Image (cartoon, rainbow, N blue to C red):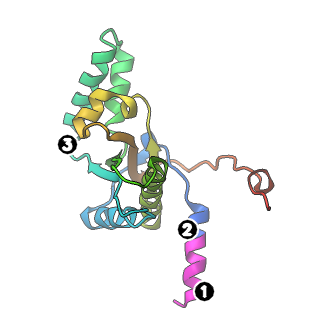
Amino acid sequence: MDAFNDRTSTLTLLATRRSGKARDMDAPGPNAAQLDAMLGAAIRVPDHGKLNPWRFVVIERRAAFAEALLAAYLTDKPDAGRLEREAVTQFASFAPCLIAVLHTPRESHIPLWEQELSTGAAIQNLMLAAHAQGFVANWLTGWAAYSPAVLALLGTAPERIAGFIFIGRQAKPLEERPRPAADAVIARW
C-alpha cells in the first residue's frame, strides 16, 4: 500500500470510530495478541516528560471483580435494592474484555493537566486500536470510577480511575450520535 492510501485508511479509521454500548457487546473479544497490540498502541501517546501517567489493569477474573464491586457499592449504599445490586454486578460482565485505566500522576515539573491529557490520549489510542481490529469499545465511568473502595481494588491514591474500557463485538447496529457542526467548534484566528 502506498503512503497516500495508508494515510487515507488512517483518516477513514478516525472518521468511522464510534463507541458501542458495553451492554450490547458480544464475544468473541480480543485474543491475547490482539489485546497486546491494542495496549501497545495505547502507550504510544504524547507524554511530556516521559512520565507514563497512566496504567492499565486488564480485569480477567470478572466474577470476582463483580463481587468486589458489589461489596464496594454496599459500603456506600447498604440499603441498595435488588435492581441496584444487579446493575452493579452486571457492569463487571458487560463485553468480553474489560480494562480499567488508572491515571497515575507523577511528581514533576510537568503540570498535572498535561498528565491528565496524556491519560485521555492513551484511552483514545486504545479505543482506536480496538476499532482498527474490528472491535467496538466503550469508555464508561459512573460511580465505580469515583469510588475509593473500587480504587483500592485496582490501585492506590493519588491514582484515580480514568474509566473502564469495554471491548467486544457489537451485537446491535451502532447508532450515530449527533456531532457538532464544524463551524460551531472550530475558529480561525
Q: Main secondary structure of the magenta part?
A: helix
Q: Amino acid at mark 2?
A: Leu
Of marks 3 and 1, the one in the foreground = 1
Q: Amino acid at mark 3?
A: Arg
Does any portion of residue 53 appear in the rendered image? yes
Quadrant for residue 142, please give it.
top left
As drawn, is 105 to the left or to the right of 2? left
Tell me which label, 3 or 2, sits earlier in the chain: 2
Q: Amino acid at mark 1?
A: Phe
Residue 119 pos. (x, y %): 42, 52
Using the image, tell me which numbered label, if any, was put on residue 4: 1
Farthest residue in the front direction?
109
Few, some or many residues within 10 Å of mark 1 (<14, 14–19, 20+): few
Q: Which residue is mark 3?
A: 61
Q: Which residue is mark 2?
A: 13
Residue 105 pos. (x, y %): 35, 47
Badge 3 element:
loop
Quadrant for residue 133, please give it.
bottom left
Badge 2 element:
helix
Which residues, given as a range, are shown in magenta?
1-11
Quadrant for residue 43, please give it.
bottom left
